[in-house]
Image (cartoon, coloured by chain):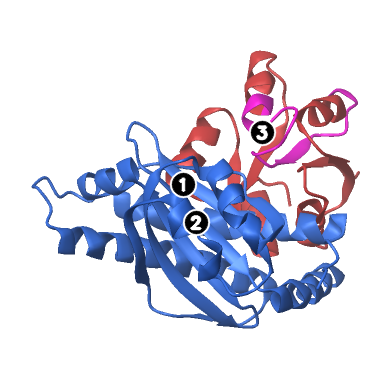
Amino acid sequence: MAVPLTVVDDSKISRKMVIRALPPGWDVEITQAENGEEALAAYRAGKADVMFLDLTMPVMDGYEVLEQLQKESLNTFVVVISADIQPEAQERVKKLGAMAFIKKPVKTENIVAVLEEYGLL
Amino acid sequence: MSIQPYTEDQADALQEVANIAMGQAGDSLARILDNFVTLSVPRIRQIEVKELADTVTAMVGEEDVSAVRQAFYNALRGEAIVIFTQSGADELAELLGYDCELDAAIEQELLLEVGNLLVGAILNGISDTLGTELGFSAPSLMAEHTPLRQVLAPDRLTWEQALLVEVNFSVEKHRFKSHLLMFMTEETIETLRHILDDFMDGL
């Protein structure tokens, strides 16, 4: 069965870059969200077993999404996708419950590595 | 000559490319300063060169600054300028581990080195993402402890319209802040439009 995946980024081009980099063999049903509020709405509609999450967004940013997911003990596999590649930025999001971090521009091999590590592929 | 503004998609693509490149520059800076660097959201404006000083002053503030400039060329042509606010320039030495009183020559060397690091990282980020070739000149010191408006006097740039990309880097717990400005020529605005279209077609 297809995995419900929500790709969250305010940039349409960036969402396209992420979707294009998805491994061809991964059976997913893709939902796109432009900000954190839309991402949480997608989660509540059962469309985000996996969430690819950007950090810098208007309305509600990626950090707030992670905090909200933690606060409500919501269960989704969050991969943060960010241009801020500093090791400390990666540690910060992992402390907030993100399972993995992938740097922009996203490469298929980086997504595959994360999915394989957690047995999702 | 009037230049058509970028479409929403072209602007979105440029914003994303700037964001990726800034992330790489921020990471390089974090490594040499051994501190977490807070990144801004890139600001992109198509401006008349005569408005330059006003536009940049609105972004940076009415301050005395030191500035390092480098020209870039090949696929895209323009100037990259790294602006250090006064406190930013002062903090730089401390962050780099100099605890003594600095002489002017060492301070200049630090500004050139950090300017070059930021410009090199951001240009490499842009050329890697867009698949273009970019070269750049050695850095030169443009101004020290000079009012920003004076640094950006319009006679320093010879064209009429420019594309301005601004990103800034600050270090939490210190007063370090620097702004990286890229000005691209009229001709480059059009070249970049095609490069962005090709980039999007490839997605």
Asked whether the residues under the numbered discs 1 and 3 touch, taking CB atoms below 8 Å apart as contact, a structural biologist would say no
Element marked by disc 3: helix
Name the residue type under label 3. Gly
Q: Which residues are magenta?
A: A44-65
Residue A53, visible in the rendered structure:
yes
Q: CA distance from mark 3 to mark 2?
A: 25 Å
Disc 1 versus disc 3: nearer the observer:
1
Q: Amino acid at mark 1?
A: Phe
Q: Which chain is blue?
A: B
Q: Is residue B33 left or right of residue B3?
A: left
Have a look at marks 3 and 2 and say if they share a chain.
no
Q: Are marks 1 and 3 on the same chain?
A: no
Decide which of tag 2 and tag 1 comes sooner along the chain. 1
Q: Chain of mark 3?
A: A
Among the 4 quarters of the image, the one containing residue B36: top left
Residue in the picture at 68% in, 16% down: A73
Q: CA distance from mark 1 to mark 3?
A: 20 Å
Tell me the subunit letter for badge 1. Answer: B
Identify residue for label 3. Answer: A62
Q: How many C-alpha atoms fall within 10 Å of the one at disc 2: few (<14), some, or many (≥20)?
A: many
Instruction: Reply above or below: B92 against B131.
Output: above
| Residue A110 visible in the picture | no
Q: Residue at x 57, y 82 (%)?
A: B73
The residue located at (64%, 60%) in the rendering is: B50
Identify the element where label 2 is drawn. Answer: strand
Which color was chain A given? red
